[in-house]
Image (cartoon, helix red, strand yellow):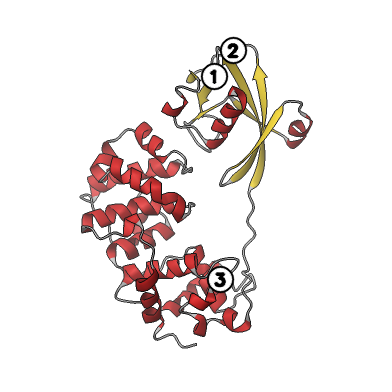
Amino acid sequence: MQKSNIPNKILKWYDNNKRKLPWRKKTSTKNREYFTLVSEFMLQQTQVKTVIPYFENFIKKFPNLKSLAKSSDQKILKNWEGLGYYSRARNLKKTAIKLLKEFKGQLPKDVEKLKSLPGIGEYTSRSILAIAHNEPYIPMDGNVERILKRVFLLKTNNEISKENLNKKKSFFSFSKRSSDYAQAIMEIGALICKPSIPLCNHCPLTKNCKAFNRKDFLIKSKNKFNKTKYFEANVYSYKNKYLLIKNKKFNFLKNLVIFPMTEINQKTFKYSIHKKINVKMSNMNMKIIINRKNKIKRKRDSLFLDKNNINKYILPSFTKKIFNSVSH
């Protein structure tokens, strides 16, 4: 498989077709590092089109590391509301504080030092090194995996293992334009080498692609499924206000405001006579019984909310759905 001109072909395509994303605009080195940091945190588990308006608003509110480090958790979480995975926002603030204290406000150029920062793991550290520092790394995200699976027509579990995919990554070689090159490869995966219907006529890698030559575009994936969990939400109301509490009980969405809830089994959910709702979270499917209670049970860290003050608080999507269901 000829690959000596792979970087040139990919970069030529990128120069002509790349998306205008707010974190890619030309700016100072300091701003580029900060934009990369914020965008990489936001892009964890979240699509680009969803992130764009959140990123633009976030940068307006927190234009640099200092403003982010000094802001309250409440303000940061409020501006993160809707993106989900709120631990990312908390870790982003912790990282800003640590960068200012220990690294003079600069992103380290070392994988291990980057991984010592809250919320930064193997993938994000390499993305930052490539994009912010122009280091020769190609982060292995879903887009890059998909390109490799098609280029080499990888089908078996052994072939699509993380170890084998990392070996196959040498196909891309490297470029002096490491920042652009890493983004270009991911961009081809996102815009051209799509999961269902790849746009092969626009792809710079068709001559190198076994899947294209054999017209076999089916992607072998590792089995992923979202677990279904069952809950009972207890709704206490008084004069059109509803009792909510800070979540201390469940590991997901810690400290966010929810209705008092208990995890139940599938059988209890199935035979309940109360109203039921389904909520798809990014990491689980929630099936919730809404149980209206007549007697108010005031709890610690509780508050009463109505339609007029609901937007002052950071509410998970399932809390909003329950609130809308009972307040109409």
Image position of 225 (left or right of 198): right
Name the mark on residue 8: none
As helix, strand or loop, the secondary structure at mark 1 comes to strand
Let me know if residue 230 appears in the view. yes
Horizontal and vertical percent position of residue 191: 48, 66
As helix, strand or loop, the secondary structure at mark 3 comes to loop
Q: Residue furthest right?
A: 271
Name the mark on residue 243: 1
Horizontal and vertical percent position of residue 202: 48, 76
| Residue that appears at 28% across and 40% down | 69
Q: Quadrant of residue 289?
A: top right
Name the mark on residue 296: 2
Does 78 sit above or below residue 64?
above
Contact between marks 3 and 2 (CB within 8 A): the answer is: no
Mark 3 and mark 2 lie on one chain; the one further toward the N terminus is 3
Q: Nearer the viewer, mark 1 or mark 3?
A: 3
Image position of 205 (left or right of 238): left
Contact between marks 1 and 2 (CB within 8 A): the answer is: yes
- Nearest the viewer among 258 and 54 is 54
**Count of number-bearing discs:** 3
Residue kind at label 1, given as amino acid type: Leu
Assess disc 2: are there few (<14), some (14-19) or many (≥20) residues with their C-alpha within 10 Å of its C-alpha. few
Q: Quadrant of residue 179?
A: bottom left
- Nearest the viewer among 198 and 290 is 198
Horizontal and vertical percent position of residue 256: 48, 31
Assess disc 1: are there few (<14), some (14-19) or many (≥20) residues with their C-alpha within 10 Å of its C-alpha. many
For mark 3, what is the residue? 198
Distance from the alpha carbon under mark 3 to that under mark 2? 56 Å
Residue kind at label 3, given as amino acid type: Pro
- Nearest the viewer among 323 and 210 is 323
Residue kind at label 2, given as amino acid type: Ile
Distance from the alpha carbon under mark 1 to that under mark 3? 49 Å
